[in-house]
Image: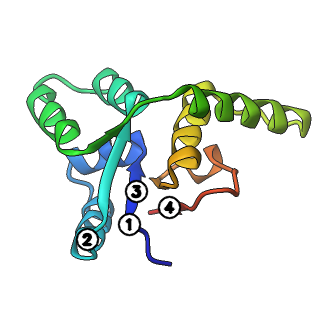
C-alpha cells in the first residue's frame, strides 16, 4: 500500500529522537518514498511531557518540521464515536489515542505507532514498527 501522509504517534517520535534503530529505519524508508510526516496536538503534548532534560531543542525542532493537523470538531466527534463503539464491545480506549485516531480518520492519514493495541480501528491504516 502506498501511503502519502502518515501521522507519527508519540511512541515513534520519542523513539526516533532517542535514536532507536527501528524508528530510524522506518523514517528512512518512508522518507525515500516521499511520505509526508505529520503530527497533531496530542503528539506535541505527549512528546514534551515525555522529554528528558536536554531533549527540549531537538523535540521542538522535530515537531516543527512535521505537518501539523489540528484536532477539529469532526476529529473530536470521531474520537468520541470510537470510544463509545469500543466501550460497548468491552474495550477501553483512552482519549489521547482516540483523538489521534480521529485526526487520522478525518484527514485520511495512516498512523505509525509502536502501540498497535491502542489503535484497533479499521477505517485508516495503522502501521507498526
Residue in view at x 61 percent, y 25 percent: 95
Sequence-first tag of 2 and 3: 3
Q: Which residue does the numbered mark 1 point to in the structure image?
A: 4
The relative height of residue 106 versus residue 28 in the rendered view (above or below) is above
Q: Earlier in the sequence, mark 1 or mark 4?
A: 1
Q: Are marks 4 and 3 in contact (CB under 8 Å)?
A: no
Residues at marks 1 and 2 touching, judged by CB atoms closer than 8 Å? yes
| Residue 128 disc label | 4
3D distance between C-alphas at marks 2 and 4: 19 Å
Q: CA distance from mark 4 to mark 3?
A: 12 Å
Q: Report the Cα–Cα distance between label 1 and label 2.
A: 7 Å
- For label 4, the SS is strand
**How many residues crowd mark 2 within 10 Å: few (<14), some (14–19), many (20+)?**
few
Q: Nearer the viewer, residue 71 or 19?
A: 71
Q: How far is disc 1 from disc 3 in space, using C-alphas?
A: 7 Å
Residue, disc 3: 6
Q: Earlier in the sequence, mark 4 or mark 3?
A: 3
Query: Which label sits in the foreground, 2 or 4?
Result: 2
Residue 106 screen position, x and y as percent: 56, 45
Residue 16 shown left or right of residue 87 in the figure = left
* Picture quadrant where residue 58 is located: top left
User: Picture coordinates of residue 48 (x, y %)?
Assistant: 28, 24
Q: Residues within 10 Å of mark 3 (few under 14, many from 20)?
A: many
Instruction: Identify the image quadrant of residue 62.
Output: top left
Q: How many marks?
A: 4
Compared with residue 105, is residue 25 higher up or lower down, i.e. above or below? below
Using the image as rendered, state which of residue 55 and residue 28 is in the foreground: 28
Which is closer to the viewer, label 1 or label 4?
1
- Residue 34: which numbered mark, if any? 2
Amino acid at each position: 500500500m502506498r501511503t502519502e501522509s502518515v501521522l507519527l504517534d508519540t511512541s515513534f517520535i520519542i523513539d526516533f529522537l532517542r535514536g532507536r534503530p527501528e524508528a530510524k529505519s522506518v523514517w528512512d524508508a518512508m522518507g525515500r518514498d516521499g511520505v509526508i510526516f505529520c503530527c497533531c496536538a496530542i503528539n506535541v503534548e505527549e512528546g514534551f511531557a515525555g522529554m528528558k532534560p536536554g531533549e527540549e531543542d531537538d523535540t521542538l525542532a522535530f515537531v516543527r518540521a512535521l505537518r501539523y493537523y489540528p484536532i477539529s470538531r469532526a476529529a473530536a466527534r470521531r474520537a468520541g464515536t470510537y470510544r463509545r463503539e469500543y466501550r460497548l464491545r468491552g474495550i477501553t480506549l483512552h482519549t489521547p489515542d482516540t483523538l489521534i485516531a480521529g485526526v487520522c480518520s478525518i484527514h485520511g492519514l495512516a498512523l505509525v505507532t509502536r502501540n498497535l493495541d491502542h489503535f484497533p480501528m479499521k477505517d485508516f491504516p495503522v502501521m507498526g514498527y
